[in-house]
Amino acid sequence: MLDLVQLRSFVTVQQMGSFTFAAERLGLGQSTVSQHISKLEAVIGRQLLARDTHKVVLTPDGEALLGHARTLLSIEGQVQALFTAQRLRGTLRLGVSEDLVASRLPLVLEDFVRSHPSVDLELTVALSGVLYQMQDNGELDLVLAKRRLGDSRGRLVYREPLVWLARDPEHVLSLAALPLIAFPAPSVTRSIALEVLERHRMPWRIVCTCGSLSGLTAAARAGMGVLVQPQSMSPSGLKEIDRLPQLEDVEFVLIPSKGADRALVSALSDDILAKVRGLR
């Protein structure tokens, strides 16, 4: 019989990519998490995780188990919520910066939805500036977005350096004007990049504008120009450029809206803080 505690450790190790980080997130000792995995592998009769010097990854058998493990844990969360007197209910309108969708959002939402099955999420993905405008118009309950240094709005989640990226740095640096691939205005990263180039009197031109990070990444991988992104979110296939002026850091923040359901906002905010900071 499969043990839910062992399955939770297995899923958490997969999410965090590390026994150490998984143990911290679960509030357990690393040796305890390792024992859970060993016992689960003994029950299954297969190796589920492959360990190397950099990261813990799933074996093919681990991949096969992962979906079923998530389903069982989801059912457990639903049953617990069903018999919890003060379970959360309602709709929460969440706005998330485009940068965070692929790299951070799935981990946050997976556990929140499992723990609070009676909460309906309305998700909006957009540029940080657009999210702030929507929030000011009363269209969002909670925003997870970027702010510039010195901006006091929101609760700090973490700070991150911005970097210049290109498929072929030598080529783009040889051009008369630096070709930029950028989000449309209002964009925090766009504003920072243009201000730095103007301050250093470097010629530039925007060769591609797109509101989708996947579109910008495709253009950068095609060699069209230079993309600015938070360092930890650098897409594969691109190289950092260290011969351009240094960019200022950005901060990712949580901003609750006045009048939003405080219990819902607090529950999701706590999840975001724990999981995103855990990934750091």
Image (spheres, rainbow, N blue to C red):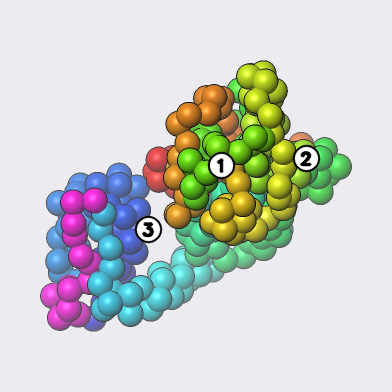
| Magenta stretch bounds | 41-54
Mark 1 lies on residue: 172
Compared across the picture, whether 55 is left or right of 246 comes to: left
Q: Is residue 176 above or below residue 123?
A: above
Element under disc 3: helix
Q: Between marks 3 and 2, how big is the CA–CA gap?
A: 34 Å
Compared across the picture, whether 2 is left or right of 16 comes to: left
Tell me if residue 49 is in the magenta stretch. yes
Residue 8: quarter of image = bottom left
* Of 176 and 218, the residue lying toward us: 176
Residue at 33 percent across and 61 percent down: it is: 14
* Of 225 and 190, the residue lying toward us: 225
Mark 2 lies on residue: 185
Residue 215 image position (x, y, % from top left) = 65, 58
Dot 1, how many residues are within 10 Å of its Cα: few (below 14), some (14-19), or many (20+)?
Answer: some
Q: Is residue 226 above or below residue 48?
A: above
Identify the amino acid type marked 2. Answer: Ala
Q: Between marks 2 and 1, how big is the CA–CA gap?
A: 23 Å
Residue 203: quarter of image = top right
Q: Which mark is residue 132?
A: none
Residue 257 image position (x, y, % from top left) = 74, 39
Residue at 48 percent across and 40 percent down: it is: 170
Identify the amino acid type marked 3. Answer: Gln
Select label 3 or label 2 by which is in front: 2
Q: Between marks 1 and 3, how big is the CA–CA gap?
A: 36 Å
Residue 279 image position (x, y, % from top left) = 40, 45
**Quadrant placement of the C terminus:** top left
Element under disc 2: loop
Identify the amino acid type marked 1. Answer: Val
